[in-house]
């Protein structure tokens, strides 16, 4: 009986020895994943106060266009541009928590019914995508965008989110940020933008490398007129209060 018993113990010990490398591997994977998770959140928190020198969108440009960018404080950007962008991109910017579920539901319904295809992406989501993620669709990118948008809305101020957005948005030809866009398109600083100029810049944001501001085509000119009217509504109803007050 001793022989078979020893053989059984030896087999069990061999199995345990075989499991140990697997357990070590999973521990390393878990520790690495945890470290990446923690460092990623520290990085996100750092950008609540620090400038963003480079973004994923800038790094992934398909051509060799020289990047033109200057970081500008929100205090040095015309309120006209803030209002125009909110009117163009996200009228409920001050009210939602990073994701506008109401606008998202409306977009899904419109797309299902065969109407004009549109997205439900907020300024916060666009900031998350432009700074940290890659272009294009896919569930992985959309899920990461949603998570980051919710996190930065919770940990950054709305004013800070708008400041980052206006500094990383592209206005075509490798031009990033409101300051460089104002200088390149109108020969003035971002603080000096008029209502019309701000509306023109907001009008091309969906396709900055396709639509032009100087001079604007018929579509951009009409859209800018619409956005001027929307910006006045934003001002009158206090929809930019979380940024400008």
Image (cartoon, rainbow, N blue to C red):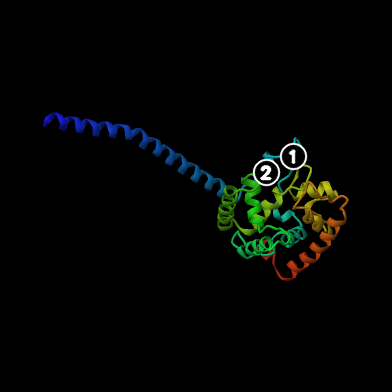
Pick whichever, 189 or 128, lies toward us: 128
Q: Residue at x 72, y 62 (%)?
A: 115
Residue 118 position in % (x across, y down): 70, 58
Q: Residue at x 80, y 48 (%)?
A: 210
Q: Residue at x 20, y 33 (%)?
A: 8
- Looking at the rendering, in which quadrant would you find the N terminus? top left
Residue 39 position in % (x across, y down): 51, 43
- Looking at the rendering, in which quadrant would you find the C terminus? bottom right
Residue 20 position in % (x across, y down): 33, 34
> From mark 1 to mark 2, how far is it between C-alphas?
11 Å
143 left or right of 195? Answer: left
Residue that mark 2 sits on? 57
23 left or right of 209? Answer: left
Confirm whether residue 177 shows in the render. Answer: yes
Residue farthest to the left? 1
Residue 191 position in % (x across, y down): 78, 54
Pick whichever, 22 or 69, lies toward us: 22
Q: Is residue 26 above or below residue 206?
A: above
5 left or right of 201? Answer: left
Neighbours of disc 2 within 10 Å: few (<14), some (14-19), many (20+): some
**Numbered-mark total:** 2
Q: Residue at x 56, y 45 (%)?
A: 43
Q: Which circle marks residue 67 in the picture?
A: 1
Quadrant in the picture for residue 133: top right
Label 1 element class:
loop
Task: Check if mark 1's residue and mark 2's residue have beta carbons within 8 Å.
Answer: no
Label 2 element class:
helix
């Amino acid at each position: 009986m001793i022989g078979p018993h020893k053989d059984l113990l030896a087999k069990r010990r061999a199995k345990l020895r075989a499991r140990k490398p697997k357990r070590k591997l999973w521990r390393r994977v878990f520790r690495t994943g945890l470290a990446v998770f923690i460092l990623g959140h520290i990085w996100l928190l750092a950008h609540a106060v620090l400038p963003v020198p480079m973004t994923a969108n800038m790094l992934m440009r398909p051509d060799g266009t020289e990047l033109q960018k200057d970081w500008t404080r929100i205090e040095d950007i015309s309120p006209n541009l803030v209002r125009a962008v909110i009117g163009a991109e996200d009228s409920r910017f001050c009210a939602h928590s990073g994701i506008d579920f109401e606008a998202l539901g409306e977009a899904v319904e419109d797309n299902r019914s065969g109407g004009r295809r549109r997205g439900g992406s907020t300024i916060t989501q666009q900031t998350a995508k432009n700074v940290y993620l890659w272009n294009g669709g896919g569930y992985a990118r959309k899920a990461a965008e949603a998570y980051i948008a919710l996190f930065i809305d919770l940990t950054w101020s709305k004013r800070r989110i708008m400041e980052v957005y206006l500094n990383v948005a592209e206005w075509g030809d490798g031009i990033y940020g409101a300051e460089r866009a104002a200088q390149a398109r109108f020969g003035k600083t971002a603080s000096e933008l008029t209502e019309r100029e701000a509306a023109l810049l907001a009008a091309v944001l969906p396709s900055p490398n396709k639509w032009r501001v100087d001079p604007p085509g018929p579509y951009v000119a009409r859209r800018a007129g619409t956005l001027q009217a929307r910006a006045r509504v934003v001002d009158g109803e206090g929809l930019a209060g979380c940024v400008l007050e």
